[in-house]
Image (cartoon, grey):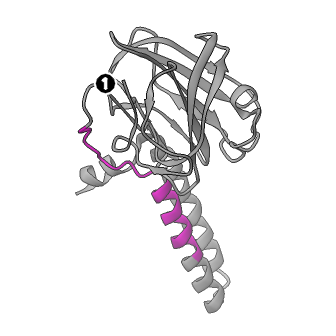
């Protein structure tokens, strides 16, 4: 049962959850010292609510990918906030179709590979913490850039930290084999993922659509 529970919580949350338990136990023990019943009750209830909020943030639902090879799955849970043609200036240095997914603090924050292929590029950029929907967040916030290519398409996806996020985790390294649906990273506490496709790629989602990682088809080629 414990092993099964651990699988449902992302590994990035283990340390934070343990620290939270220690702090909440210490807080409740300290408050109990004053023997004020109403204060003990409020502290206990608030601690339980806070603990379950932390658990839900680091949840890691197991989702089997059923998409076909030519379909790009959502790399994250959230809402589509951008679909537009833009100039991609870091890697391709040409015009691309951008699709952006905004993740609120209540979304699953695991990031998963949207396609199969080989990692051609992986880079971490330190930066600011503007709100994730800010126009300059794509180029000025803390972020990572990963490019995965197969024999049909190359897709760039970028993790972008938001105003609440203070740490992006990226597992990808150049020349890694990317398997659609497997973890490539995690962003803590509110953020965004941008995807960049070749012009002509068929986008399968619409603005403001809610998407589910590993399940929703973002594009096809």
Position of 51 with respect to 36 (left or right) is left
Determine the residue located farthest toward the front in the rendered image.
200
Residue occupying image coordinates x 58% and y 54%: 105
Give the magenta range: 46-66
Looking at the picture, tell me which residue is in the foreground, 34 or 118. Answer: 118
Is residue 106 depicted above or below 65 in this figure?
Answer: below
Residue under label 1: 179
Residue occupying image coordinates x 36% and y 25%: 115
Is residue 163 depicted above or below 137 in this figure?
Answer: below
Q: Position of residue 135 (x, y in %)?
A: 75, 36
Q: Give yes or no for residue 25 being in the magenta stretch.
A: no
Q: Position of residue 110 (x, y in %)?
A: 45, 41
Q: Position of residue 100 (x, y in %)?
A: 57, 37
Mark 1 Cα within 10 Å, few/some/many (few <14, many 20+)?
A: some
| Figure quadrant of residue 152 | top left
Residue occupying image coordinates x 76% and y 28%: 140
Position of 26 with respect to 141 (left or right) is left
Position of 33 with respect to 141 (left or right) is left
Of helix, strand and loop, which one carries label 1? Answer: loop
Looking at the picture, tell me which residue is in the foreground, 39 or 142. Answer: 142
Looking at the picture, tell me which residue is in the foreground, 75 or 171. Answer: 75
Is residue 174 depicted above or below 130 in this figure?
Answer: above
Q: Give yes or no for residue 65 being in the magenta stretch.
A: yes
| Figure quadrant of residue 178 | top left
Q: Which quadrant of the figure contains the C terminus? A: top left
Is residue 65 depicted above or below 143 in this figure?
Answer: below
Residue occupying image coordinates x 65% and y 13%: 90
Position of 110 with respect to 180 (left or right) is right
């Amino acid at each position: 049962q414990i092993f099964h529970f651990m699988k449902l919580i992302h590994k990035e949350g283990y340390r934070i959850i343990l620290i939270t338990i220690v702090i909440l136990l210490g807080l409740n023990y300290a408050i109990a010292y004053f023997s004020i019943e109403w204060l003990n009750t409020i502290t206990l209830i608030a601690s339980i609510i806070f603990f379950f909020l932390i658990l839900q943030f680091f949840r890691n639902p197991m989702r089997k990918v059923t998409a076909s090879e030519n379909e790009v799955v959502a790399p994250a849970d959230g809402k589509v906030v951008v679909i537009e043609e833009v100039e991609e200036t870091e890697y391709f240095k040409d015009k691309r179709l951008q699709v952006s997914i905004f993740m609120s603090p209540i979304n699953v924050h695991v990031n998963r590979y949207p396609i199969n292929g080989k990692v051609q590029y992986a880079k971490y950029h330190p930066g600011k913490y503007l709100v994730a929907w800010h126009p300059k967040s794509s180029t000025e916030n803390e972020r990572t850039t990963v490019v995965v290519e197969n024999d049909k398409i190359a897709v760039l996806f970028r993790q972008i930290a938001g105003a609440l996020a203070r740490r992006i985790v990226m597992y990808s390294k150049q020349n890694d084999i990317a398997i659609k649906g497997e973890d490539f990273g995690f962003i803590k506490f509110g953020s965004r993922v941008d995807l960049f496709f070749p012009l002509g790629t068929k986008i399968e989602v619409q603005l403001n659509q809610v998407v589910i990682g590993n399940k929703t088809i973002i594009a096809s080629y």
